Image (cartoon, rainbow, N blue to C red):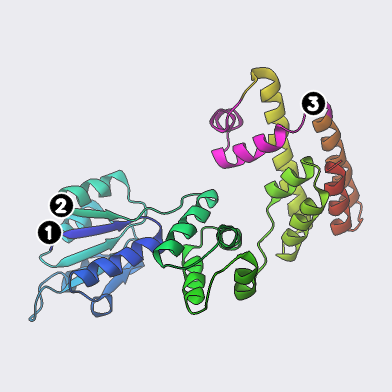
Amino acid sequence: MPLTAFTGPRFLAEETLRTTLAARGLSVRDLPWLAGEDVTAEHLAPHLSPGLFGDGGVIVDFAGAKPDKALLELLAGAPVTVAVLDESPAATRMKVYEARGEVIPTPGPARPNDVTGWIVARAKSMRLPLGKDAAVYLAEVFGLDLAGIAGELTKLELLDGPFDRGRVSAVVGREPPGDSFAMLGAATAGRPGEAVTQLRRLMASGEDPFRLLGAVVWQYSLVARCVALMAQDGRVNENIAAQRLGVKPYPAKKALDVARRLNEPKIRAHLGRILDADLAMKRGLDPAVTLERLIVQLSL
């Protein structure tokens, strides 16, 4: 049996590993599973020879391991089934997998914005009558925790549908965490109620008020620089902004979304209000009240 590497988000890669091995007549529970410090030639050697009753094999989890070329060659040359879990293999490992075995990728959402589509597709494959609003809710609550989302979908299978946001929220029993960029976006769009709700969710999740203000300062510095970029260059997309600002495309896109609603006088006024809030908190005024006042002021 060839070396088989399973790549992609861990939960999905492991799920694919289990179904693939089952289709080949192997049970994951019957195979040794080595990970971390046990991924060495010494520990693997006893599992790389055929047993008395057939093929045998081993599952090798590279999370937390540092496999070298010699170890890869040992696995690739084994006369038994070797299933490797490798979420994001380096190019050198990928070359070995492709040359000496096979690669079975399991694509999954790479960004929080992609999770809703993944949930909709998974629910459809499960024939689960899940509304789009419910999928959005699950994405807001769990983010890239695909295992957590899959667990909730499995729970919903035990109930009668259809499932809208309200019903799923009652089953899950969790509020979506606050989103600081969503908070600023709502504020600059003149929606203070939504902005304050995001702030309160962030506070309820245990966020420190001073860290939150620090996040506002950092995000508004990006917004201010985006305002300057657009004033200088006209139309600016997220990739150009990310390159010019030295940040990843996601925060650049969020900053641009806010910046498009502002101009230089408005951003200067907002920066002044942020400075006033910073001084007020450092002087001992109630942090939560000061932050709420600031968010409302940014909505004006």
Which residue occupies the foreground of this view, 14 or 287?
Answer: 14
Is the residue under label 3 in contact with that under label 2 (CB below 8 Å)? no
Q: Give the class, few, some or many, for how many residues have Cα within 10 Å of label 2's Cα (few <14, many ≥20).
A: some
Q: Give the class, few, some or many, for how many residues have Cα within 10 Å of label 3's Cα (few <14, many ≥20).
A: few
Report if residue 58 is visible in the image: no
Task: Provide the residue designation for mark 3.
Answer: 264
Is the residue under label 2 in contact with that under label 1 (CB below 8 Å)? yes
Q: Where residue 132 appears, x then y in whole percent?
A: 56, 57
Disc 2/disc 3 C-alpha distance (Å):
59 Å
Which residue occupies the foreground of this view, 89 or 20?
Answer: 20
**Quadrant location, the C terminus:** top right
Which of discs 2 and 3 lies nearer the camera? The answer is 3
Q: Amino acid at mark 3?
A: Glu
Q: Where residue 251 appears, x then y in whole percent?
A: 61, 41
Residues rendered magenta in the picture: 236-265
Image: 265 above or below 124:
above
Task: Provide the residue designation for mark 2.
Answer: 100
Q: Amino acid at mark 2?
A: Arg
Q: Is residue 216 left or right of residue 35?
A: right
Of helix, strand and loop, which one carries label 2? helix
Disc 1/disc 2 C-alpha distance (Å):
8 Å
